[in-house]
Amino acid sequence: MTAVPLAIPGWLQSLADQFYLNFIKDDRYMYLVRGLKITLEVTVLALILGVVLGVIIAIIRSTHDKTIEETKPGFGRFILKFLNAIAKIYLTVIRGTPVVVQLMIIYFVIFASSNNKVMVASIAFGINSGAYVAEIIRSGIMSIDQGQFEAGRSLGFNYFQTMIYIIIPQAFKNVLPALGNEFIVLIKETSVSGYVGLQELTKAGDIIRSRTYTAFMPLIAVALIYLVIVMIFSKLVSILERRLRNSER
């Protein structure tokens, strides 16, 4: 008795053909692999820069708001007010302009002679993220009871030691969910890096689309990869938040 071969449904065969055309033929999946690598590099570097900038700006702003009335007139008061004014200008400009415009200004104007697109993109996104991180951390610092500052002073810490060892850790716990959300936004914002010719994940999908003249599979693949990254990062933030809560018990 002769076996009858199973007929493959037409729609399934069409999907298989599209998958081969978009990802297997000419090793086009490597565009996504390289794009993902660049996206993660830019995100991690921008995250580090954003946190450093954010903490510095948050300390300046919160120090001004908490101590300016008690600070005696003089050079120290002038420096504090000057740094606070610079911080406010930075926050206003960065939060008031689109990130893609900031990216193009930094790439085409400030670093016009640089060929390191990953570095330029990381700086642009780090500066942008730093403004939002600063306000998130500042709100956390301002929410800490004044008694915590007094406790630090009673232990012999100066103002900045109290801020680093006592206030910032508590503020970090309070604003962790908001920081996690900002970092998720940062991951997705890197998708505009293609405006300066950086072949990150979204640009990789666009390159595949330009080769195959089909948009569905490349774009869906890019969307799914971003979704998986965000889900993994959200899970890590959730685990960290739970451990911080447990450490307080």
Image (cartoon, helix red, strand yellow):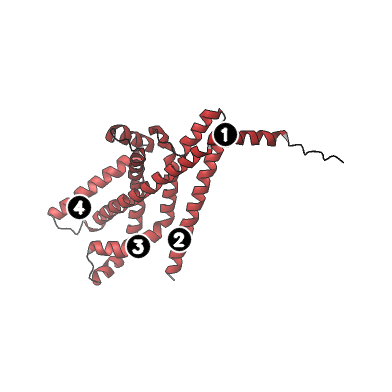
Q: Are marks 1 and 3 in contact (CB under 8 Å)?
A: no
Which mark, residue 197? none
Q: In this view, does 164 lie to the left or right of 239?
A: left
Residue placed farthest to the left in the image? 74
Give the label, 4 or 2, closer to the camera. Answer: 2
At label 1, which amino acid type do we have?
Answer: Lys
Which mark, residue 169? 3
Of residues 194 and 141, the one nearer the viewer is 194
Name the spot of residue 110 as percent of width and height, x first. 27, 35
Mark 4 vs mark 2, CA separation in Å: 33 Å
- Does residue 146 show up? no
Of residues 118 and 162, the one nearer the viewer is 118
Mark 1 vs mark 2, CA separation in Å: 44 Å
Q: Provide the secondary structure element on which disc 1 rests.
A: helix
Give the label, 1 or 2, closer to the camera. Answer: 1
Q: Are marks 2 and 3 in contact (CB under 8 Å)?
A: no
Name the spot of residue 204 as percent of width and height, x first. 48, 36
Which mark, residue 80? 4
- Residue at image mark 1: 25
Name the spot of residue 33 as percent of width and height, x first. 49, 42
Q: Residue at x 72, y 33 (%)?
A: 10
- Residue at image mark 2: 241
Q: Are marks 4 and 2 in contact (CB under 8 Å)?
A: no
Mark earlier in primary sequence (1, 3):
1
Name the spot of residue 80 as percent of width and height, x first. 20, 52
Mark earlier in primary sequence (1, 4):
1
At label 3, which amino acid type do we have?
Answer: Pro
